Image (cartoon, grey):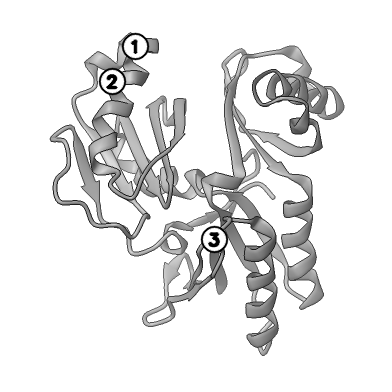
Amino acid sequence: MSLIERVTRATVCLHLAPHGLDGVLRRAGRPVADSAFHVPILNPDASWEVALASLRGWLEQHNEKKLPLAVSLASRWCAMLMVPWSGALLDRASAQRFLHSQFAAVYGDGARAWRLAADDAPYGKPRLACGIDAALLQGVQDAAAAHGRRCLSIEPVVGPAWRSIAGSKPAAFALVEGGRLLLATSSGGRIAALHSQSCAAAWGDELDRAWRRWNLRAPQLDAIEHVALLDLSGEPQDALPARFQPVAVASAAHLMREAAWA
């Protein structure tokens, strides 16, 4: 999240989720026509091990070109947290200790086995941090390396989702995936706060309730009238609350515009 590298040549952008692998070829930052694909994954337990096996299989079948990869991961496998400012963040080793203590306080001791990274917020400001199971992260890196591919980035899908709409400067956005709902506010061009929870297939009914529950803890949400909505769930809804304004999204892989932290 702290290192941004523009993708200027052909890059295969992949999104790995419990029930599907989506991809698209980008050249000079733009999707190549008719290059998008979707590989369904039979994965009733939403296991990342099963999804990772599907990624390995796809790489083995499409190994004729060694194009680099930019990978996003479903929110289900990425723990997100806004961490307070600390001087410990200025040093790589102490930053990891500080981040692990923050994640362990929220997610338990299991978080100490995660790989953690935080964004480059201004000095003294809270930072957005993410934790990913170290075995999952290593597995993606190893899968790419085994087929001679460079992995430009591995990041939670909220990263490319935010970058895809940041130019319009929304005060808040909602990201819906299969079984997951994430709400976030922005300030100064960055994600400033977030809320994540599970959701049912009929997530349209849950949107407003989730917003109101979050509002109880964050009264400042009262001032936000419109929330950009990115739907990656594949579950059409009959109606949506007026507050939420859908943004057209072809697929999660199409959101990948820039490589970020790996």
* Extreme-right residue of the structure: 93
Give the vertical position of 259 relative to 151 (above or below). Answer: above
**In the image: residue 139, left or right of residue 81:** right
- Tell me what residue is drawn at x 20 percent, y 31 percent: 226
Which sits in the foreground, 50 or 93?
50
Between 99 and 204, the one lying in front of the other is: 204
Of the image marks 3 and 2, the number of the one nearer the N terminus: 3
Judge left or right: residue 252 versus residue 96: left
Label 3 and label 2: CA atoms lie apart by 31 Å
Which residue has dot 3 on it? 44
Say which residue label 1 marks.
216
Q: Badge 3: how crowded within 10 Å, few (<14), some, or many (20+)?
A: few
Q: Do the residues under discs 2 and 1 have CB atoms within 8 angstroms? A: yes
Q: Residue furthest front?
A: 44
Observer-side mark, 3 or 2, equals 3
Residue lying at 49% horizontally and 73% vertically, measured from the top left: 40
Which callout, 3 or 1, points to the residue nearer the camera?
A: 3
State whether residue 259 appears in this view: yes
Distance from disc 2 to disc 1, alpha carbons, whole Å, reads: 7 Å
Q: Secondary structure at mark 2?
A: helix
**Residue type marked 1:** Leu
What residue is pinned by disc 2? 212
Q: Position of residue 76 (x, y in %)?
A: 55, 45
